[in-house]
Image: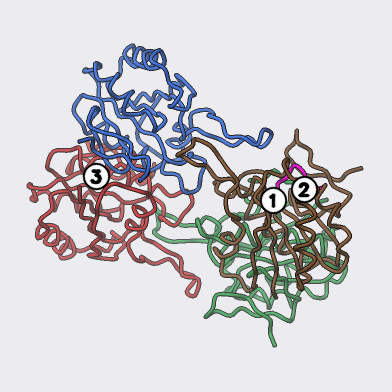
Chain colours: A brown, B green, C blue, D red
Amino acid sequence: MKIDIFCTGGTIDKIYFDAKSDYQVGEPKVGRILEAYNLNIDFEVHSVLKKDSLEMTDQDRQQLKDAISSCSNDLILVTHGTDTMPETADVLKDLTDKTIVMFGAMEPAMYKTSDAEFNAGCAVGAVQSLPKGVYIAMSGRIFEAGKVKKNVEKGIFEIKE
Amino acid sequence: MKIDIFCTGGTIDKIYFDAKSDYQVGEPKVGRILEAYNLNIDFEVHSVLKKDSLEMTDQDRQQLKDAISSCSNDLILVTHGTDTMPETADVLKDLTDKTIVMFGAMEPAMYKTSDAEFNAGCAVGAVQSLPKGVYIAMSGRIFEAGKVKKNVEKGIFEIKE
Amino acid sequence: MKIDIFCTGGTIDKIYFDAKSDYQVGEPKVGRILEAYNLNIDFEVHSVLKKDSLEMTDQDRQQLKDAISSCSNDLILVTHGTDTMPETADVLKDLTDKTIVMFGAMEPAMYKTSDAEFNAGCAVGAVQSLPKGVYIAMSGRIFEAGKVKKNVEKGIFEIKE
Amino acid sequence: MKIDIFCTGGTIDKIYFDAKSDYQVGEPKVGRILEAYNLNIDFEVHSVLKKDSLEMTDQDRQQLKDAISSCSNDLILVTHGTDTMPETADVLKDLTDKTIVMFGAMEPAMYKTSDAEFNAGCAVGAVQSLPKGVYIAMSGRIFEAGKVKKNVEKGIFEIKE
C-alpha cells in the first residue's frame, strides 16, 4: 500500500530559528513522523508549498489541485495550515477519483505536546478506510469537505451547521 | 461522537517499577493519550483485563467479547497485546453490529519512541470511517480480522496470505 | 537546600500562539521543568522580565540585579535569552556574596529536542558546587562571567579569548 | 574539556524487548543523551558492566575502580543503578586524584518522563565545578560519597544522617 503526501506548510511545519529569534515554515515534517515508526506502508512526500495557510492564494490552491490531479495514486494525504484548511478542501472537491484526507496540527510537530503524530495517524487510518472523496482529519474526527469549520476560540475543528 | 474503548493490557500499558526492578502491565494508557489532545470526541475507557497477551485464555477472550457485546455503542476500540491480537480479533468476529478496531503498541506508551499515539490515531480515524466489522490498526495499516498476522522478526503486522 | 530562580524570558520561554501564528515569550518554564522530576530541592521562581534578550536594556539589567540583590538566599539561578547572556553576567558581577548561575536554551523548552532540561540540570548541579561568583551554564560547560561568548554560527557558548 | 564516562548499567539503561516481553539492561544511553545536544565538551563512553546494581559484586566494583584508575583524565562520570550507588561510591573513595560524579535515573532513559537527561546535566555541571573527590548527583542534589542514601519509599536520594 502506497500513500502520496502533498505538503503545503502550516503550523505543523513551523520551526524556530534561534539566529533570527523567529519562526518560519520549514521543511515538511510528515516524512520524519512516519519514518519514526516501523510502518508497513510506502509513502512519498511532495513539498508543494511552504506557507502559513492564511497566506494561501487561489493560485496556490490550484497548484496543489494540479499536483494531486497529476498523481496516479488514489490514496492521498495533504498537510495544510489549519486556518484555511476547509477552504482548500472545498477547492479539491472536484477530484472525485481519489480518497484525499487533509490534516495539520494545532501545535508545531517539533513541540512535545504537538498533535501532529496523532493527527497523522488519524489521517493514515482514514485514507485507507474511506470511499473516494475529500476529508479533513482534525481533532480526532473525520469531516467531509464542505461540512467542517475551525473553531478558533475552542481550538478544535467541528461540524459546520 | 462517542467511542467506547475496552482495554486488555499488553505492551502499550507496560510500566517499569523501580522498587522491583521489573515491569508490569499497568493501568490503561489510552485515556491519557486521548486526553492529551484537545479532541472533539467523547470516549469512555473500560479496563477489562491487564494481561500480557501471551497469557490470555479463551475465558479472557469471552469476557472481552461479553463486555463489548453488552455495550450499546457501535464505535468500539480495543487495546491489546500484539502477540495474540489476531487470535482475539477472530473471536470477536461474531459481533457483526459494531465497528471494532483493535490496536496496541510495539513499545510501551511511556516510551519516547512509542508507536502508541500514532496507532491510537490510526484506530480513531478508522473506527469512524469503516463499515461494521472487526479490524486491526497496526503498522500504519488497517487489516480485516482473519487476514492479518504479526511478523515477530520484522516487528510489523502484515497480511496473512 | 533552596534555590531562588530569577527569570527574564528568552528562547527557553518562547511559545507558539496558534491564534496569532506567532512565537512570543511566555510564562517561565523552569518551574515546570523542575517540578516534572521528583527532586530533593526547594526552589522559588521569580518572574522578573519576559523579554527576548536582544531587547534587554540597561534598566532591565539593573532591575534584575536589584531583584537578586534583595534576595537573602545565596544560591541563585537566572534564566535568560542566549544572545546577551554574557552582557548581563557582566552586570551581575558586583554581586559577590552569592553563587549565581545563568542559563537558557538554544531551543524553546516546549520543543522535543530542547536543551532546556539538560541545561537546567547543569545549572542546578553547578550552583551548589561552585564558590561565590557569577557563571554561565551553557553547551555543557560552566563559564565564568567575563570569559564567555556566544558563537552564533556554531550555536554554542565558548571561552572568550 | 574532556570527560570520561564509565557505564555499569542500571535503570537508566533498561530497555524493553518486545520479543521477550521483558526489560533488560541494554547499551549505555549516556552517549546518546549527550550527543543529542550541541555541546562544547568532548566525552568518551566506556561500557564496563551492564548490570542491575542489585546484582553488582565486590569484584564488579573492583573492576570499575581499576578501569577509572587507569584512565589519565581527572574528570570522570559514572552511570550506575540507583539501588547500590552509595555502596559503589564508598569503594571509589580511594581514588583521590580525580573528580568522580556518579549518576543514574529513577526511570529508564527511554521513558518520556525519565530523569536521565536532567541528572546527566547535573553531573556534567558538577564534575567541572567540584574539587577532587567522589560524589553522587541524584534528585537535583550533589552528595559526597559516604553521606548519601537512597530513600526507596520516597524515590529520592537524601543525606545519610
* The C terminus of chain B, quarter of image: bottom right
Whether D56 is drawn above or below C47: the answer is: below
Q: Do the residues labelled 3 and 1 touch (CB within 8 Å)?
A: no
Residue at the disc numbered 1: A104
Please tell me whether mark 2 sits on a helix, a strand or a loop: helix
- Label located before the other in sequence (2 or 1): 2
Residue B39 drawn above or below residue D27:
above
Amino acid type assigned to the residue bearing label 3 in the image: Ile
- Chain where mark 1 sits: A
Chain of the residue that carries numbered disc 3 in the rendered image: D
**In front of the other: A106 or C70:** A106
Vertical comparison of B56 with B33: above or below: below
Which region of the structure is painted magenta? A81-86
The mark total stands at 3
Can you tell which quarter of the image residue A24 is in?
A: top right
Residue of label 2: A85
Q: Residue drawn at (70%, 60%), measured in percent from left and top?
A: A6
Q: Magenta segment, principal secondary structure?
A: loop
Q: Does the magenta stretch include residue A109?
A: no
Q: Mark 2 lies on which chain?
A: A
The answer as to whether the residues below labels 2 and 3 share one chain is no
